[in-house]
Image (spheres, grey):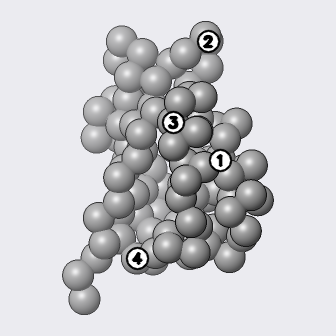
Amino acid sequence: MAAAFAEAWARPDLTAQQWWEQLAPLCEPAFGRTLRTVDPARVPATRITGRPVAVQPPKDGRATYRVATDAGTLSVALAAIDGRWVAVDNDFVRTVR
């Protein structure tokens, strides 16, 4: 799930509607609504460069992963809701060059 979210998130080439339509099914509804306000053209990453690494392995219905991108590190928080894992938050730390 973290990989799927990261792949969909790192698409600044899409329109806002296309970007949101790819991400929304991967998200908890409230988080999905929050992402609707994001302009994907401002997303700094254009591709994923590594596999998700568990920062907080799945336990008690929660997990957090870091995913390397061409512009920095994306953190994705997941929760098990109604029997499936969904994204509930994300953060991005840009690589200093």
Whichever of callouts 2 and 1 sits on the residue coming sooner in the sequence is: 1
Mark 4 or mark 3: whose residue is earlier in sequence: 3
Residue under the image location 38 percent in, 22 percent down: 62
Q: Which amino acid does label 1 sit on?
A: Leu
Give the residue number, with chain letter if any, for mark 4.
71
> Mark 3 and mark 4 in contact (Cβ < 8 Å)?
no
| Mark 3 surroundings within 10 Å by alpha-carbon count, few (fewer than 14), some (14 through 19), many (20 or more) | some
- Report, in whole angstroms, how far the alpha carbon at label 2 lies from the one at label 4: 33 Å
Asked if disc 2 and disc 1 are in contact, CB closer than 8 Å, the reply is no
Image coordinates of residue 7 in percent, x first then y, are: 61, 58
Q: Which of marks 2 and 1 is in front?
A: 1
Q: What residue would you read off at disc 2?
A: 83
Find disc 3 in the rendering and name its residue: 31
Would you say the residues marked 4 and 1 are in contact, meaning their CB atoms lie under 8 Å apart?
no
Residue extending furthest bottom? 97
Q: In this view, does 73 lie above or below 75?
A: below
Helix, strand or loop for disc 2: loop
Q: Which of 18 and 48 is in front in this view?
A: 18
Q: Where is residue 15 in the image (x, y as percent from the top left)?
A: 73, 68
Mark 4 vs mark 1, CA separation in Å: 19 Å
Answer above or below: position of 24 versus 17: above
- Kindly tell me whether residue 96 is visible in this rendering: yes
Element type at mark 4: loop
Of labels 4 and 1, earlier in sequence is 1
Q: In which quarter of the image is the N terminus?
A: top right
